[in-house]
Amino acid sequence: MSAQPIDWSKVPHTKLVSDLEDDDEVAEVKAGEKQRREEEAKAERRRQKEAWKVEEVRRVEEA
């Protein structure tokens, strides 16, 4: 067995990515997920506000 290190650049299916590039990609994904969660939370608040308005109208009509 050879003690030579593997030259990964000669392996065709391997994409070499620096840690910095990998960190940047992870940061982009996390930012996208955060934005999606914020948009979902905003939409949920709108739905709750609408439901509250509908409930208020129903209460007034019953009175």
Image: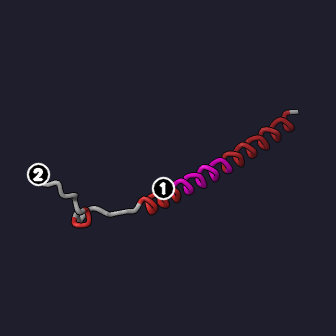
Q: Which residue is mark 1?
A: 26
The mark tally for this picture is: 2
Crowding around mark 1 (Cα neighbors within 10 Å: few <14, some 14 to 19, many 20+) is few
Which residue occupies the foreground of this view, 11 or 39?
11
Position of residue 44 measured from the top left corner of the image (x, y, whole percent): 67, 46
Range shown magenta: 29-42
Q: Residue at 75% of width from left, 45% of height from top?
A: 49
Q: What kind of residue is marked 1?
A: Val
Q: What kind of residue is marked 2?
A: Met
Residue 56 placement, left or right of 15 = right
Q: CA distance from mark 2 to mark 1?
A: 37 Å
Dot placed on the residue nearer the N-terminal end, 2 or 1: 2
Q: Residue at 33% of width from left, 63% of height from top?
A: 16
Which residue occupies the foreground of this view, 39 or 2?
2
Secondary element type, mark 2: loop
Q: Majority secondary structure of the magenta segment?
A: helix
Position of residue 1 measured from the top left corner of the image (x, y, whole percent): 11, 51
Residue 29 placement, left or right of 19 = right
